[in-house]
Image (cartoon, grey):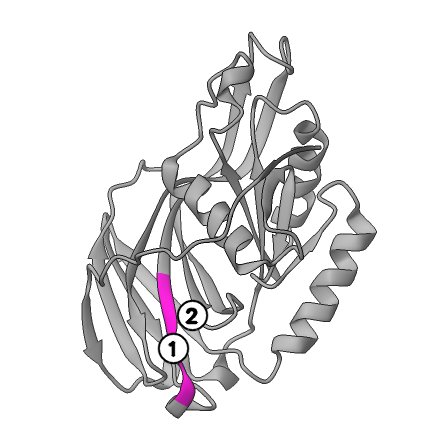
């Protein structure tokens, strides 16, 4: 496992970049939606410990109760191979988790698997991941919020339902552009000679607005390749828990 220490400090969050419209829509009421858990695997093509975790994520990506995402980071590029899927936004998201102390340690490392925004499990241990999915799903059961979405080409619309405690709700709406399956042949570094398959690789990630507990609609444009899809995530500003998520095909 590769790791780096990361000192905690305040982050200046960018303002909303999407149109927000209040609305009422029974289609996003909590009772109408089966909530999906979210797994985020922070990985690197330059990390010899990562391929086993990358392979295991494919298994979880096949499940209809889980949104499994692969987020490549770039801080191991100096070892000898520049990660072709890494983005600054992916790396920053992992650093945000470290600052929030999701792992119990203020550090970033690969492979790191974040479960529902509030816990970590060994990225190579299926039983441990299953246990954390069950535990965190139970923890979040009373605070889940319905999320739905549609897109017409690059025009994406995300609808968020109402909080069970709207007076205290504060969350950020994130939108990811995702490639469902990407194979990369690696010719240098620790994984030299390997061809690695990445499930649901996050190719772009941006904040599209703030949600305060009331039903709302968020609209934005996000260019994508024809084979890509989108994932919208509603994430608590308080503890980082993922209150709701949807894959938009």
What kind of element bears circle 2?
loop
Q: Measuring 45% from the left and 48% from the top, which residue is drawn there?
A: 93
User: Where in the figure is residue 59, as x and y percent of width and height?
Assistant: 69, 44
Residue 70 counted in the magenta span = no
Q: Is residue 145 left or right of residue 213?
A: right
User: Where in the figure is residue 248, as x and y percent of width and height?
Assistant: 39, 56
User: Where in the figure is residue 247, as x and y percent of width and height?
Assistant: 45, 57
Residue 169 counted in the magenta span = yes
Q: Is residue 226 left or right of residue 127?
A: left
**Who is closer to the viewer here, 152 or 3?**
3
Residue under label 2: 237
Neighbor class of circle 1 (other Cα within 10 Å; few <14, some 14-19, many 20+) is: some
**Who is closer to the viewer here, 11 or 125?**
11
Check residue 193 in the rendering and tell me which mark sits there, or answer none. Answer: none
Real-space CA distance between mark 1 and mark 2, rounded to the nearest whole angstrom: 6 Å
Instruction: Say above or below: 23 vs 172.
Output: below
**Who is closer to the viewer here, 36 or 237?**
237
Marks 1,2: beta carbons within 8 A: yes
Per the rendered image, the range of residues in magenta is: 168-173
Q: Measuring 47% from the left and 53% from the top, which residue is drawn there?
A: 96
Quadrant (top left, top right, bottom left, bottom right) of the N terminus: top right
Residue under label 1: 170
């Amino acid at each position: 496992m590769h790791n780096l220490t990361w000192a905690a400090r305040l982050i200046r969050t960018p303002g909303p970049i999407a149109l927000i419209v209040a609305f009422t829509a029974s289609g996003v009421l909590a009772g109408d939606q089966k909530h999906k858990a979210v797994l985020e695997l922070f990985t690197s093509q330059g990390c010899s410990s990562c391929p086993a975790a990358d392979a295991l994520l494919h298994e979880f990506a096949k499940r209809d109760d889980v949104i499994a995402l692969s987020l490549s980071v770039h801080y191991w590029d100096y070892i000898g191979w520049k990660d072709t899927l890494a983005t600054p936004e992916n790396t920053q998201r992992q650093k945000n988790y470290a600052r929030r102390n999701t792992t119990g340690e203020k550090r970033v490392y690969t492979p790191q698997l974040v479960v529902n925004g509030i816990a970590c499990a060994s990225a190579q241990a299926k039983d441990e991941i299953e246990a954390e999915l069950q535990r965190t799903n139970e923890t979040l059961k009373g605070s889940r919020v319905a999320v739905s979405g549609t897109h017409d080409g690059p025009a994406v619309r995300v609808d968020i339902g109402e909080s069970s405690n709207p007076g205290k709700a504060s969350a950020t709406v994130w939108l990811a552009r995702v490639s469902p399956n990407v194979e990369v042949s690696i010719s240098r570094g620790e994984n030299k000679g390997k061809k690695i398959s990445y499930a649901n690789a996050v190719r772009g990630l941006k904040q599209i607005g703030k949600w305060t507990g009331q039903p709302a609609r968020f609209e934005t444009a996000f260019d994508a390749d024809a084979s890509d899809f989108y994932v919208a995530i509603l994430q608590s500003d308080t503890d980082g828990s993922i209150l709701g998520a949807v894959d938009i095909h």
